[in-house]
Amino acid sequence: MKNTHARAAFLSLVTRSHAPGLLLALMLAGGCARAAASGGQEAAPAPAVGRAAPQAVVSIARRTAGLERHDGFFPFYYESSTGKLLLELARLGEDFLYLNSLATGLGSAGVTLDRGMVGEEAVVRFERHGPRLLLVKQNLGFRALGTDNAELVRSVEESFPVSVLGSFPIVAESAGRVLVDATDFLLGDMFDVRGRLQRAGEGDFRVDRERSALYLPRTKAFPKNTEIQALLTYASDRPGREVSQHAPDGRSLSLRQHHSFVELPPPGYEPREVDARVGIFGIGFFDYARPLDQGYRRRWISRWRLQKKDPAAAVSEPVQPIVYYLDRGVPEPYRTAFIEGAMWWNQVFEAAGFRNAFRVEDLPDGADPMDARYPLIEWVNRTEPSSSWGTTFVDPRTGEIIKAVARMDSHRSLVDFNIYAGSRPAIARSEADATGRRLHDSDAAALAETLGACGWADPAPGDWLATLDPDVSAEEFAMARRRQHIAHEVGHTLGLAHNFIAASYGRASVMDYPAPLIRLDERGDIDLADAYRNGPGAYDTLAIRFAYAQFGSREEERAGLEAIIQDGIRRGIRFITERDADPDGSIPEATRWVNGPDMLAELDRVMAVRGVLLERFGAAAIRPGEPVALLNERLVPVYLHHRYTLEAAIKAVGGMDYSYALLGDGQTVTRILDARVQRQALDRLLAALRPEALRIPEAVVAMIAPPPFGSLRDRRAFDSPAGPAFDPLAAARTLASFIVDGVLNRERAARLVSFHARSPANPSLDEVLERMIEATWGAPAPTGPGDAALRRVARRAVLDRLLALAGDDQATVEVRAAAEWHLTRFAGRLARTPAGDPAEDAFNALARRDIERFLERRENPTPPSRPLPAPPGTPIGQAN
């Protein structure tokens, strides 16, 4: 450093002294000295600052001497002295599949980072650029198919970008093969855990390379795939709550990421076009070689490659069946339930022309669940109930499914048990088995025969069954749900989307979300005999036929697929999915967690069941020795038993039925629901706001204790603004707001305005608002104990929603005008009607002042009071 500084100072001095000749002489002298040192030859230029001098090419044999070669699709070497993984590549420029996934999870229901979670698939290739290979992801969203115009193809390729996923330095090469250092790529956050944590509000994390390493027990090479796993440590100085609760040290979160490099499937798979009338997942892309009258957008369905051994046979064995492997970590009784439920699909495939097309086997000993060769049913543990998922990796070129993972949440059966346990006090024990199912004569005879064959003959099997351990019956109830549940998730991995209207025509699909069908028998007792359908339905058969049936030619395929759809239309098999089944939707039957073809009749039936469940609810919902506080959790599915059927009835107000029709296919495109049906739905919803419908029996309230020492209130239980005391008014406020907010949803309100303008026979928004106000604020004084407070709960729910609707800048002007007009009239009404009761007068005065603050547009109007959120109430335990 000293010599460098001295030389720089001297040169500076020469320059300042205006002696360029001296400077030039010094430079020439330096050049002559270098030439002399090199024997008269011109010296090689010194390497540029920051750039390494070029090195002689090292052979692969020399660079890997002493290292073990793992032969396979991409051979690799692991260098333990440096922790590096070296990939040997011979087919540069050839496409292959790259898949990334998460081998280990966080275990949180709030942050979706689960064991077995799949990332994105990509068609990639290695391209050489000087001393490095770039891993380039092809852009298959934009193509030009079926054309011999090479310039058109090139124009599409050059119009859209590719993505470089990684850069790999070449460390050796021999005879057309190169050896690259893949370590940096493999230890990178390809799954984007950092981004997922940040979006979940869990803090800013970084990958700490010093605490990250390749995970060799799960790093292997096979002829058609190379599987590499890495342990990545994510560090943060300020981790979020979920990470802190689930990691031993929230500042250091270590997860294993899995990379799969997979050979592309061979030719022979035939893509099939998506049809919106059948719910099959697919891939989408632009095809710029299509005729202008067809549009550029195309979609192909996702499905497995399934081919008949005998194409001429109506039903044939497949060339290669679809085989799923069961995670060895799945315990009994779930294991048996999963096998039975998943195997339902085998019988469905027969309708598509395949015998023994689907089976389930145990994952081989020592096999890696992340290995791309194994479609998997995987067991996932979290600290709370959350979603299960049916996910797939597909070939982005064609839609062919390559690998599937059905991730099954272990908590789901605890949710099912809560449903059962909440019903248990209402189940008649005499002449019923432990599930509450009526023991029919045929069941009794079959059981007696079985018992006799085992030497356990019993003259009165019905009485004997009444003494069985109720835990066994709860298990049977839960396993009936888990059979349906695994069929649902496997259905996703076969390509099927949700169908949220199938429960309205005979529970016709496992791809719906099934509410347990709890009935009242002829004696008024709870009957769980048919809680869950034991098998697939008509829609499942139609969808599998559409996706997998084989035809002789393209023309036969088009005609055959249309015939399948027309057969479904004639039989009333409908498909409605996702967004159209959301709470703000307009089709009553397209609602998650409901049963039956007539949602108003179903609401009447469900309300009757709820009445029995609530009337009989008590200590029998828990077992001796369990904390009494559990009654809160068990009360939730009882008190909110009608929640989703109420949602269906809400959709009838301003309701419109519709289908995903194509021109000329015979389906009804849209149909506004009959005005009489809309008003009948409103009648039922207003009845559900009455005090007697919001009430929780005092005997139940008195039994519910706060959480015991060492535990917190579970999120599946009712929260309370009253601290340790259970507050029935808070539960009622949650329910009342659910009803009112649903009816006065801004989109629903806009439909009421629009439909009334199209036909005055339809209910207007003004009519609905007037009726809601009169049903709550104009209701006669109640006589039951505590009912006056419950009436105030319903009243405030209506007022708060009116205030929110009038101030909603996303609502239409007609909707806001109607809401504000009723608020204006309402304020005057409140000023004229003193109640004479201190609680009522105070309540009314606050309501009047809140309206005046809103109408006067004061700078800081009092925000509307909000109810506590409802506990997660779906039968699978998802938050709403």
Image (cartoon, helix red, strand yellow):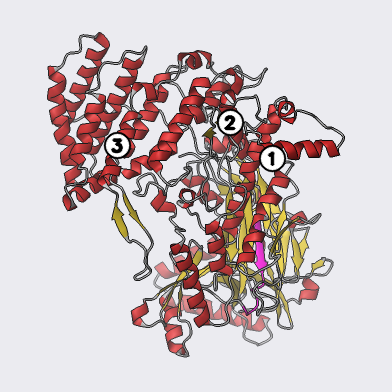
Helix, strand or loop status at disc 1: helix
The residue singled out by tag 3 in the image is: 682
Q: Counting residues from the N terminus, which is met first, the one under dot 1 or under dot 2?
A: 2
Q: Nearer the viewer, residue 561 or 820?
A: 561
Q: Residue at x 72, y 27 (%)?
A: 469
Whole-percent x, y for residue 385 in the image: 57, 38
Residue tagged by mark 1? 442
- Location of residue 373 (image quadrant): bottom right
Counting from the top left corner in percent of width and height, residue 853 is at 17, 27
For the residues marked 1 and 3, what is the alpha-carbon distance in whole angstroms?
A: 43 Å
Residue occupying the point 37% across, 68% down: 662
- The residue mark sitting in front, 1 or 2, is 1
Horizontal and vertical percent for residue 64?
A: 79, 69
Residue at 50% in and 28% down: 638
Note whether residue 856 is visible: no
Q: Earlier in the sequence, mark 1 or mark 3?
A: 1
Give the amino acid type for the residue marked by disc 2 in the picture: Asn
Residue 105 in the magenta stretch? The answer is no
Q: Is residue 112 left or right of residue 819?
A: right
Question: In the picture provided, is 409 more to the left or to the right than 858?
Answer: right
Image coords of residue 577 (percent x, y): 44, 54
Residue at the far right in the pictured view: 455
Q: Name the mark nearer the viewer: 2 or 3.
A: 3
Could you tell which of marks 2 and 3 lies nearer the N-terminus? 2
Give the quadrant of the C terminus.
top left
- Which residues are drawn in magenta? 257-268
**Residue bearing the label numbered 2:** 418
For numbered disc 2, what is the local secondary structure?
Answer: helix
Kindly identify the amino acid type of the residue bearing the numbered disc 3: Leu
Question: 10 Å neighbourhood of mark 2: few (<14), some, or many (≥20)?
Answer: many
**How far apart are labels 1 and 2 at the CA level?**
30 Å
